[in-house]
Amino acid sequence: MIEQKYILDANVFITSKNSYYDPQFHPGFWKFLDLGINNGTFILHRRVYEELRKGRDELSQRVALWEPKVKSPSPEEMTKYKEVCTYTVSQPQWKEKSMLFWMELIRGL
C-alpha cells in the first residue's frame, strides 16, 4: 500500500486561520493538522515554515510547535511538487505576480 503524503503551502494555513477555520471556533481542524504534521502525512517545507513564522499571531505560535517536524521533502516529493506548481501557474486565473512567486519557488527547489 502506498502511503499518501501532502506538501502543504502557507496559504492552506493562512486562509484557514483567516476564514472558516478560526482556531477558536474549529479546534478540531487544527488538531487534524497537528496530527498530520506530527505523523508525517503532511509535510511542512522549511520555506513554508519560515514564511508562517514571520507573522506575530497565534498561527506563528502554533507553527513554532511544529519546528521539530519541519523538513526538506525527498527528491521524489519535490519532483511531484514541481509538477503541481507547474500545472498551477499554467492556469488562466493566475495573476502574473503569483506566477512569478511560484516560478521562483520552483527554481529554488
Image (tube, grey):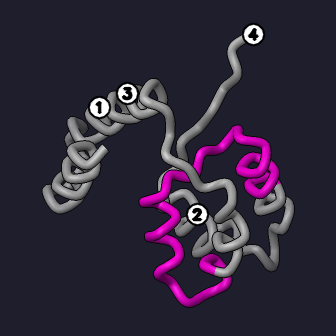
Looking at numbered disc 1 in the image, what kind of residue is underneath it?
Tyr
Q: Badge 1: how crowded within 10 Å, few (<14), some, or many (20+)?
A: few
Question: SS at mark 2?
Answer: helix
Lower position in the chain sequence, tag 2 or tag 4: 4
Lower position in the chain sequence, tag 2 or tag 1: 2
Q: CA distance from mark 4 to mark 1?
A: 27 Å
Q: Main secondary structure of the magenta part?
A: helix
On the image, the x and y values in percent for residue 65 come to 72, 70
Looking at numbered disc 2 in the image, what kind of residue is underneath it?
Phe
Lower position in the chain sequence, tag 4 or tag 3: 4
On the image, the x and y values in percent for residue 17 come to 63, 72
Q: CA distance from mark 1 to mark 3?
A: 13 Å
Residue range of the region highlighted in magenta in the rendering: 32-60
User: What residue lies at 24% left-to-right and 38% top-to-bottom?
Assistant: 91
Q: Badge 3: how crowded within 10 Å, few (<14), some, or many (20+)?
A: some
Q: Badge 2: how crowded within 10 Å, few (<14), some, or many (20+)?
A: some
- In the rendered view, would you say 23 is above or below 86? below
Q: Which residue is mark 1?
A: 87
Lower position in the chain sequence, tag 2 or tag 3: 2
Tell me the number on the disc at residue 79: 3
